[in-house]
Image: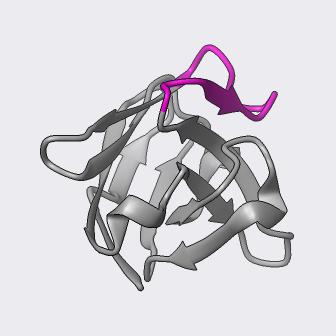
Amino acid sequence: QVQLVESGGGLVQAGGSLRLSCAASGSIFSINAMGWYRQAPGKERELVAGISNGGSTYYADSVKGRFTISRDNAKNTLYLQMNSLKPEDTAMYYCAAGNVAHAPDEYDYWGQGTQVTVSS
């Protein structure tokens, strides 16, 4: 089992920035990739960004050039730096761990989520 705890969400004005963090614990050796999903009310869950153990990254088209995913293996922590935020980025953001960074169906473990709200 892998436990994931997110932090760093909040309310920000459009154009602003936030950094999300995700602390991982448990059977981390079983993880090949970590990622961030988001889900807005009435919308499907979307894989926003993923990163493999080797450092390869994936980004959804909607966040390319604005969001950066990174990980600190020594701290077992995943980050999502979000810049130039837009109101449409408003969603619950979830940290996830799994097998393939760019494959939405290959994530097995989930955090509880952290809310990001972008005001216009």
Depicted 57 relative to depicted 4: above or below: above
* Residue 57 located left or right of residue 80: right
Depicted 3 relative to depicted 119: above or below: below
* Residue 23 located left or right of residue 47: left
Q: Residue furthest top?
A: 65
Residue, x 25% and y 50% (percent of image)?
77
Pick whichever, 61 or 4, lies toward us: 4
- The percent coordinates of residue 46 (x first, y second) are 77, 57
- The percent coordinates of residue 1 (x first, y second) are 41, 85
Depicted 108 relative to depicted 1: above or below: above
Q: Is residue 44 magenta?
A: no
Q: Quadrant of residue 45?
A: bottom right
- The percent coordinates of residue 12 (x first, y second) are 37, 46
Q: Quadrant of residue 114?
A: bottom left
Q: Which residues are magenta?
A: 54-67
Q: Quadrant of the C terminus?
A: top right
Q: Residue furthest front?
A: 29
Residue, x 69% and y 31% (percent of image)?
59
- The percent coordinates of residue 66 (x first, y second) are 56, 21
Question: Magenta stretch: dominant SS?
Answer: loop
Q: Is residue 63 magenta?
A: yes
**How many numbered tags mark residues here?**
0
Residue, x 44% and y 77% (percent of image)?
111
Residue, x 56% and y 53% (percent of image)?
36
Q: Quadrant of residue 49?
A: top right
